[in-house]
Image: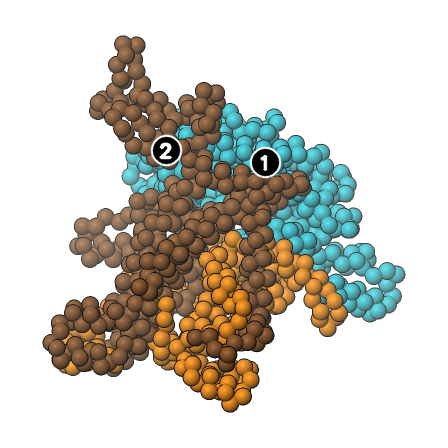
Amino acid sequence: MAAISSDNHGLRLVTRYVVLTLIALIFVFPLVFMVVSSFKPDLQLLRDASSIRAFLPVGDISTDNYSAAFERAPIGLFVFNSVLVTGVTVLLSLLICSLAAFSFAFLEWKGRNTLLSIIIATLIIPFETIAIPLLLLVSKLPWIGLEGLSVGWLNSYRVQIIPWIADGLTIFLFVQFFKDLPRDLIEASRVEGASWWQIYRRVVMPLSGPVIATAAILKFLVMYNQYLWPLIVVQEETYRPVMVGLQYFFQLNTAWGEVMAYLTIITVPVLAFYLALQRAFIASIASTGVKG
Amino acid sequence: MNLSTTLAGALVASTSIVGMAAAQTELTMWYHGGGNEVESDLLDSIVTDFNAAQSDWMVSVESFPQGSYNDSVVAAALAGNLPCILDVDGPVMPNWAWAGYMQPLPISDAALDGHLDSTIGRWAGEVYSVGLWEAAVALYARQSTLDALGLRTPTLDAPWDTEEFMGALEAAKASGDYEFAFDPGMAWTGEWYPYAFSPFLQSFGGDIVDRSTYQTAEGALNGDAAIAFGDWWQSLFTEGYAPVSQDPATRDTGFIDGKYAFSWNGNWAGVATLDGGVDDVVFLPAPDFGNGPVIGAGSWQFGASGTCEHPDGVAAFVEHALQDEYLAAFSDGIGLIPSTTEAAAMTTNYAPGGALEPFFGLSEAQALVRPVSPGYVVAAKVFEKALADIANGADVADTLDAAVDEINTDIERNGGYGH
Amino acid sequence: MASKLTTSNRAGWAFALPGFGLLAMFIVVPFFFAFFLSLTNQRLISPNPTEFVGLDNYRNLLGIRVLSIEPEVNAAGEIVRDETGAPEYPRVRTFTRNNPDYPQYAGMREWFRWHSGDTAKVVVARDVVFWKSLRNTLMFVLVVAPVQGALALGLALLINQRLRAINIYRAIYFMPVVVSIVVVSLLWRFLYAEEGLLNSILHGLSFGMFEGRDWLGDPDTALGAIKAMSIWQAVGFHMVIWLSGLQTISPTLYEASAIEGASKWQTFRYVTWPGLRNTAVLVLIVITMQAFALFAQIDVMTNGGPLDSTTTVVFQAVERGYGKQDISGGAAISVILFLLVLTISLIQRYLTREK
C-alpha cells in the first residue's frame, strides 16, 4: 500500500515527525491566531498581532467578545439558516446529481455527449458573472405554496437552495466514480430484469459511499460559504446566512475581537462536519479512483 | 408569500384592534444599522412612538449591515422588491431618484426649518430625502503637539493655508516623535476617499465634475488646479508625511497610540479618541489650499421609494422623526452631529462647550455636498482609484486624464444623467 | 461499448433531466442572458431604454494599438537628451487626447513601452486596466497551477506513509480548505501587514537582516502574496486528490521495482508518476478553473491595487457590473473569460489526450 514502510525506526522516524509537524504548523497558525484573538480585547489583540503573542492566550483573556458578538447579531439564527440551507441543498444535490451521473455513466441515449459537454462547460462560468441575470430570473418565478400561487422567490429558503442543487462538479465527480464500477454488475442486473431505478437504488448507490462523502463535503463548503447570492436575494433578516451576517461586525470602528469570535463560531460547524466525515472522507476520496 | 403575510397582518390588525376606526397601513422601512445595537434601538424607539402617536400608519423596520446596504437595495430594486421607506446615503440619492427608485417626499417646508442645508437631499428641484444628522471631518491633533511644535492653532475664521499646513507636517516629521506626521485614513477604502479627499481638491480649485453642467469632468478633474492638487497629494506620500497603505486596525488606533501627529478623521471617531485617553485632542478645521477651506457633507437620510403607494405616510414618519429630541438622542447615542442648532443644544457633545462642538461649526462653515448628480456613484469610484494610484506613485496628469475619460464616457453612456 | 442492454433513450433522459434541467435553468439561461446583455448598453441602474450596440463593449475592452513616438528634436535637428543621455519623448497624452491628427488613438492609455533604436514603441489600449487584469490572471494561473499541483503532490507523498497518527496530519493539512476563503483572506491581511506577524517572523529568522515590508501595499509583492496565500489555502484539497491517485497504484508494481533495485527517484519516475496520469489531468483542470475565477481574495485584501497589480478578470467583471453600474460591460468581460478558459481547457485536453 504505502511506498515507504521498511525503515520506520529511530532517527528517521523522529525526523519524519518533525517535518510533518513543521508543515502542520504552517497550515494551522492563522487559525490558531483567529481562535486565540477571539479571547482578547481589541487593543491587546492588535498589539499582539505582530509578535508570537498572537498565538498565545496571554494577557487579558475573557469570553467578552463572544457575549458582545451574540448581542450584536442574531448569530444563532444565522447559523441555523446556513445549516438548514446547506443541509437541504447537500441532500438534494447528492440525489439529483447522482441520478444524472448514473445516466451519463451507464446508459446510452441520444444527446448524451452533448449534454455532458454542456454540463462540464458550466464549470467555467464564475457565479459572480451571472448573478444579476439569475436575480432577475428568480424574482419572476412562480411558486405554489400553502397560500396558493405567488410570484417571485425573493426572501425565502428555496431561493437559496434550488438554484444550487445541480452543479457540474458534483455530476462530474459521480460520473468519474461510476465509470470505475464494474459494468458487468450493471448488465447482469439488467439481464435479470431489474429496472434502471432498481439498479441505481440497489446496486450502484450502495457501492458509492466514498464518492457520496466526497461530494457532500465539497458541496457543504460551497453552500456554507455563500455570500453574494443570499446578499442580493434575501432582504429579511429572518433568512440571512452566516457570511452575510459577517458584515454586521464591520462598523466604522471595527471591533476586531468580536470579528474573531464570530469567525471562530461560524467555523466550528464546518470543522465539526469535516471531522465527522474525515475518516470516511479521506478514505473515500482516496478510493474514488479519479480518472481524468 | 410577501403578499400573503401582509394580508394576514392586515387581517390581524383589523380584527384585533376593534375600537379603531381604520386599520393602520403598514409601511416597511429599510435601515443601514444592522449590527449597530445602539443605533437600532434609537430607531426602534422613534418607530414605536410614531406608531402609537397616530392611527394611519404602522412602520416596521428591517435592518441591513451598512457595508452591504447599497448592494441590497439595488438588487431589491432590480427585482421590484423595495420597501416604502428607504434610508439612503446623501450623495447616492440623486442616482436612485433618477433611476426611479425614489420619489419626491411630500414634506412640509415648516418641518425642514432650521435644518443644516446639507441634511436635505434635493434633486431636480424637489426634496427627496432628509437626514436626522450630519457628519463632519476635522484634523485631529493634540494641543500638546501644537505647543511642542510651536504651531498656531487654526480657527474657522483663520484656517491654516497650504504653507502653514505643510509647515506643520514638516515640523512633526522633523521632531521624530511620530511614525508619520499625517494620517489621511488610507485604510478606509470606498466612499471615504471622495468624501474626505475631494474637499482638498475643491479647496485647490478643482472638482470631481464640472458642477455648472455636470456633463464633463474635463478641466475640473485634470485642469491646472487638479494637477496641483494631485502633485500635492502625491508629495504627502513621496515626502514621507503619510503612509501610502495602512491596515484598518492601525487606522482605528494609530492616532490614539501617538503614531500620527495629525489625523484626518470624522466626528464619529471623536468619542473613541477621548475615551482612548487623548484628553487634549483638538479638532482643527480643514486647511485652505487657496480656494477656501472645504469639508465633505451629506450623510444618511430618509426618503420614499419609487414604488411606495403612500408617500404621505413616509412624509408623516419623517416629520415625526425630525423632532429635536430624536436628533439629540441619535447624536448622544452614536456621536453624530444633530441637524438643527436647537437639537445640538440638547446634546452632551455638541452643546456650546461640548467636547465635539467644533464639528457643528465645521458643518455650518465649511461643508460642501459632493456633486449632486446621478453620475456621482460612478465618478466617486473612479476618483477613489485615481487617488489610490497617485498615492502609489502613478503619473499625476495621466491618471487624472484617464479618470476624466472614464467619467465622461460614463456620463455619455447614460445620456447625460438627466441634468 | 454500446449494447442493447444499456440503450434507453427514455430512461437516459429521465435520469439526467432533473439535474440538467436545473443547470440549464439556473446557469445556462442566465449565461445566455449575460451574453445578450453584453451586446447592449444596459446599465445596472437607469431609466434610459436599452439599446443594441453590437460588439461595442468588446471593442472598448479589447482595443489595443502600438504607437511609435519619435524623440523630441531641438531647433538644430538634434535629439533632446536628458542628463543620463536617454532621449526625451513627447508625452503620450499629446497623441491620445484632443489630437485630430491621431483619431485612432483617441482615449487610449499607455500600457507599456519598449524602444526600437531611438523610437519608442508604446502599446496603448482603450482599457488598460482590463489588459492588466488579463495579464495578472494569467500570471496567477501560470504560477499557482503548477506550484500548487507540485506542492500538493509532495504533501501527498509525504502523507502516504504508514505512520502512527498520520490521520491527524492529514486532517490538519486539509484544515485551511474547510475555512471560507473570505475568512482566510481577513486573517492573512493581519499576517501580511507591515507590522504583522510575517515580517516579525522573517525578521527573527534572518537575525534582523530582513527589513519589514508592506506585502500587500507594494505593487511588486502584492500579487505574489496573494498567490502564496491561495496556494496555502487550497493545497490540502489537491493533496487529497493526489493521495487518491497514489492509492490506486498497485503495490505489486512497487514490490517489482524494489526487487529490481530501483532508486527512490526511479521508482517515482517509472512507477508512481505514470500511475498518476489521470489524476494529474484532473488536478490540472480543477486548479486552472479555480485560478481563473480568482476574486474573493482580491475583494477582501487589495481591491485590485496597488496600481492595478492585483486586479483580475473576475474582479473587473464585478467592479464594472456592480460597482460602476456597467452591467453590459461586466457581462462582456464574463463572456471573454468564458471563451478564454474554454480555449485553454480544449488545449489542455488536446495536450493530455490519450495517445
When asked about the image quadrant of residue B93, the answer is top right
Question: Which residue is tagged 1?
Answer: B413
**A28 and A156: which is toward the camera:** A156
Question: Does residue C173 appear left or right of residue C126 in this picture?
Answer: left
Tell me how far mark 2 sits from mark 1, CA to CA. 26 Å
In the orientation shown, which residue stands out farthest toward the front? C4
Q: Characterize the local packing of mark 1: few (<14), some (14-19) or many (20 or more) Cα atoms within 10 angstroms.
A: some
Check the rendered structure and report the hue given to chain B: cyan
Local SS, label 1: helix
> What's the mark number on residue C123?
2
Q: Characterize the local packing of mark 2: few (<14), some (14-19) or many (20 or more) Cα atoms within 10 angstroms.
A: some
User: What sort of colour scheme is used for the picture?
Assistant: by chain
When the figure is inspected, residue A100 is found, relative to residue A259, above or below; the finding is: below
Check the rendered structure and report the hue given to chain A: orange
Check the rendered structure and report the hue given to chain C: brown
Q: The disc labelled 1 sits on which kind of residue? A: Arg
Label 2 or label 1, whichever lies nearer to me, is 2
Q: The disc labelled 2 sits on which kind of residue? A: Val
When asked about the image quadrant of residue C256, the answer is bottom left
Name which residue lies at 47% across and 30% down: C107
Q: Mark 2 and mark 1, same subunit?
A: no
The chain ID associated with circle 1 is B
When the figure is inspected, residue B106 is found, relative to residue A157, above or below; the finding is: above
Name which residue lies at 36% across and 71% down: A291
Q: Position of residue C332 (x, y in %)?
A: 51, 46
Name which residue lies at 27% across and 53% down: C199
